[in-house]
Image (tube, rainbow, N blue to C red):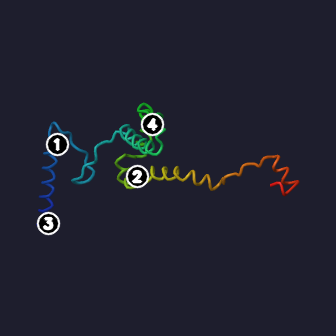
Amino acid sequence: MDVALQNIQAEAAAVDAEISAATSPETPAPAQTEVGQTSPPAVDPLTEARGIIGFMVVVATQVYPQLKPIYTEAVQDQLAAVTAPLLAQYGVTLGGLMGKYGNWFNFALVAGPLAVQTYQALQPARHSARHPAIKPAPNSLMFFAASRWPWVT
C-alpha cells in the first residue's frame, strides 16, 4: 500500500511542477476542470456567429448565386451581432458544429449544388411531359367546311 501511495504522490508532484512551470509571470494560469485537464479558451460569441453565418452564406451562394448581392459583409456583420447572444445562451460554437456535423456540411457543399443543377436541367422535360404540344387550331373556314361536307378535307 505504501508503494502505491508513493507513486500517487510522485505523480501529483509532477503535475504540480508542470502547473508551476506553465504559470510563469507572463502566462496567466489556465482554469482547471479536473486534475491535469485545462478548460478550453473562452470563445467570443460574435466571432463564432460571424464564422457560422459566413459559412452558411458560402453554402447558400453556391446553390443560389443571386443571393450574393443580398448577403454583403455589412449584412453578415449585422446578422452576427444579433445571433451572437443566442449562440452564447445555448453554447453553440463553430467548432462544435463542425465536429458534430462536419461530414453533413461537406456533403451539403457537394451534393446541394448538384441537386439544384439536376433539378434545373430536368425542368424542361418535366414541363413538356405535363403540357404536351398543342395542335394548332384549324382554320375556322376549313373546320366549318369539314363539318358540313366531309369530302372537302
For label 2, count other residues whose C-alpha is less than 10 Å away and answer few (under 14), some (14-19) or many (20+): few
Q: Quadrant of residue 147?
A: bottom right
Mark 2 and mark 1 lie on one chain; the one further toward the N terminus is 1
Q: Determine the image quadrant of residue 101.
A: bottom left
Q: Secondary structure at mark 4?
A: loop
In the image, residue 27 lies at what x, y percent? Answer: 18, 39
How far is the residue under mark 2 from the one under mark 4? Answer: 19 Å
- Tag 3's secondary structure? helix
In the depicted structure, whether residue 139 falls above or below residue 3: above
Give residue 48's position: percent from left, percent from top.
37, 41
Q: Amino acid at mark 3?
A: Ala
Indicate the amino acid at tag 4. Lys
Identified at 49% across, 50% down, the residue is: 116
Q: Quadrant of the C terminus?
A: bottom right
Q: Quickly name the residue at label 3.
A: 4
Mark 2 — residue? 110
Q: Nearer the viewer, residue 136 or 54?
A: 136
* Amino acid beneath label 2: Val
Which label's residue is closer to the chain start, 3 or 1?
3
Instruction: Spot the residue most to the right.
Output: 148
Q: How much space separates mark 2 and mark 1, taking CA atoms?
A: 46 Å
Do residues under tags 2 and 4 come within 8 Å of each other at their CB atoms? no
Amino acid under disc 1 = Thr
Label 2 or label 3, whichever lies nearer to me, is 2
